[in-house]
Image: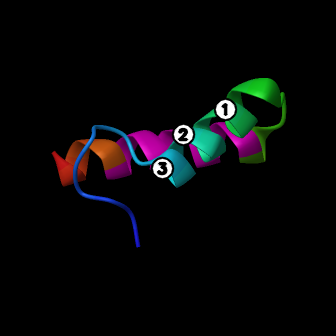
Amino acid sequence: MYPSKGGIPILLNEKVIGAIGGSGDEDVEVLESALENVISNM
């Protein structure tokens, strides 16, 4: 689903940017889950 090379996947980057741009609790949860996915894929 995500490219395994080149650091953080582009789709994940878009989710992180969207989470940072928002101010709702759901956005925070998306950001946290995205960061967890990055760590688990390292």
Q: Nearer the viewer, mark 2 or mark 3?
A: 2
**Circle 1 Cα neighbour tier, 10 Å, few/some/many (<14 / 14–19 / ≥20):** few
**Circle 3 Cα neighbour tier, 10 Å, few/some/many (<14 / 14–19 / ≥20):** some
Q: Nearer the viewer, mark 3 or mark 1?
A: 1
Residue 20's spot in the image, x, y percent? 70, 26
Q: Residue at x 15, y 45 (%)?
A: 42
Decide whether residue 35 is among the magenta residues.
yes
Q: Residue at x 83, y 36 (%)?
A: 24
Q: CA distance from mark 1 to mark 2?
A: 6 Å
Q: Residue at x 41, y 39 (%)?
A: 35
Residue 40's spot in the image, x, y percent? 21, 51
Report if the CB atoms under discs 1 and 2 are less than 8 Å apart.
yes
State which quadrant residue 22 falls in: top right
Question: SS at mark 1?
Answer: helix
Q: Is residue 20 left or right of residue 22?
A: left
Residue lying furthest left: 42
The residue to which callout 1 is attached is: 17
Q: Is residue 37 left or right of residue 34?
A: left
Task: Establish if 4 lies above or below 32.
Answer: below
Q: What quarter of the picture does the N terminus occupy?
A: bottom left
Residue 28 or residue 37, whichever sits in front: 37
Residue type at numbered disc 3: Ser
Residue type at numbered disc 2: Asn
Question: SS at mark 2?
Answer: helix
Q: Is residue 25 left or right of residue 14?
A: right
The residue to which callout 2 is attached is: 13
Q: Residue at x 63, y 43 (%)?
A: 14
Q: What segment carries the magenta color? A: 27-37
The residue to which callout 3 is attached is: 33
State which quadrant residue 4 falls in: bottom left
Decide whether residue 11 is among the magenta residues.
no
